[in-house]
Amino acid sequence: MAKKNHRLNSISAGTEAVFHIIIALFALCCIIPFIFVIIISFTDEASLREIGYSFVPQAWSTYTYQFAFDKLPQIWRSFFNSIVITVVGTVLSTFMCALYSYALYRPDFRFRNFFNYLSFFTMIFPGALIPTYIISKQVLGLSENYAALIVPLLVSPFNIIVMRTFFKSSCPMELIEAATIDGAGEYSILFRIVAPIAKPGIATIALLNSLAYWNDWFQSMLYIRQNKILQPLQALLMELQNNVEYLNRMAGQMGTAAVMESMKAPTQSLRMALVVMIVLPIACAYPFFQRYIVAGLAVGSVKG
């Protein structure tokens, strides 16, 4: 019987090889475009104008990165801003998500259904832009400061539902009841019992929050209008690209000097360099969360 079960639960070597080939091809489809972007970012702009994009460019150049860092000293400050916003925002949003989800997870919480419905309702019908802007800027005073870039993204209804489902799937109520009998308080139960068990779910939510904060530029466009030193990396690089495109469009109307300056300003390679600057730092965070991502998302999506 053991041999029969082993045979039923295994796959042949040929089928396994086919699966490996399919996964390898899928991995190449994900990796090759990013490698292509890196190659283009190090391609000479004149070569791009002459022959277009190529995996083997005629001329290599680092002028695009020199242009970005020399023309815009603010870029180092923006790197610092993005790191601070991402780290602080991820810690606070994950902490608030864990607290909210823990309350929804406890069946003995009196207002559990109300807050569960509230989070679900706001996910289906989010607040409009104008009321959100008025409340954030005029009521809460979120303008020209770091809080304006952190507070609007603190609570995510989707993350709350995923975290609540993970708590329900991985933390049996018998542990909560035993800890309560031993005299443990709610915070002790959450941080000493539930959180260690639900570590994959918490790590997954932390990764989702870090991606949201790192890639966000819209909050800066709304609330950072004068104090440009607080701009995150994404907002600054978008502004840099727009300025270069504007220079190229107006070059014909601004005389010979402007035309020469426009020819020196990279456009195609600059776009790719901006992608590399934005994607590479956050991609380095994936290995730290890799072992938690599959387990966290799988458990959170199977049971409701």
Image (cartoon, rainbow, N blue to C red):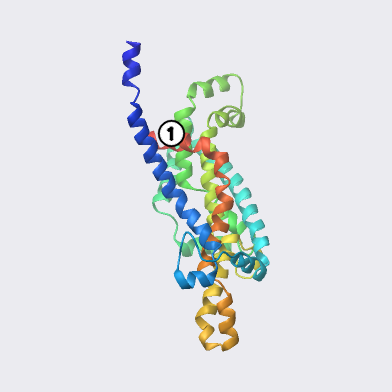
Across and down, in percent, residue 62 comes to 61, 64
Across and down, in percent, residue 214 comes to 56, 54
Determine whether, in the image, residue 65 is placed left or right of residue 7: right
Three-letter residue code for mark 1: Val
Q: Nearer the viewer, residue 83 or 244?
A: 244
Across and down, in percent, residue 154 comes to 55, 50
Residue 104, compared with residue 137, is above or below; it is: above
Determine whether, in the image, residue 113 is placed left or right of residue 187: left
For the N terminus, the quadrant is top left
Neighbourhood count class around disc 1 (C-alpha, 10 Å): few under 14, some 14–19, many 20 upward: many
Q: Nearer the viewer, residue 240 or 122?
A: 240
Q: Quadrant of residue 223?
A: bottom right
Q: Residue furthest front?
A: 58
Q: How many marks?
A: 1
> Would residue 221 be visible to someone looking at this image?
yes
Across and down, in percent, residue 125 comes to 40, 53
Query: Residue beneath label 1, please?
Result: 299
Determine whether, in the image, residue 278 is placed left or right of residue 145: left
Residue depicted at x 58% and y 40% = 288
> Would residue 102 be visible to someone looking at this image?
no
Residue 111, compared with residue 45, is above or below; it is: above
Residue 151, compared with residue 53, is above or below; it is: above
Disc 1, SS: helix
Residue depicted at x 39% and y 50% = 124
Residue depicted at x 52% and y 38% = 290
Q: Quadrant of residue 150?
A: bottom right
Residue depicted at x 50% and y 68% = 268
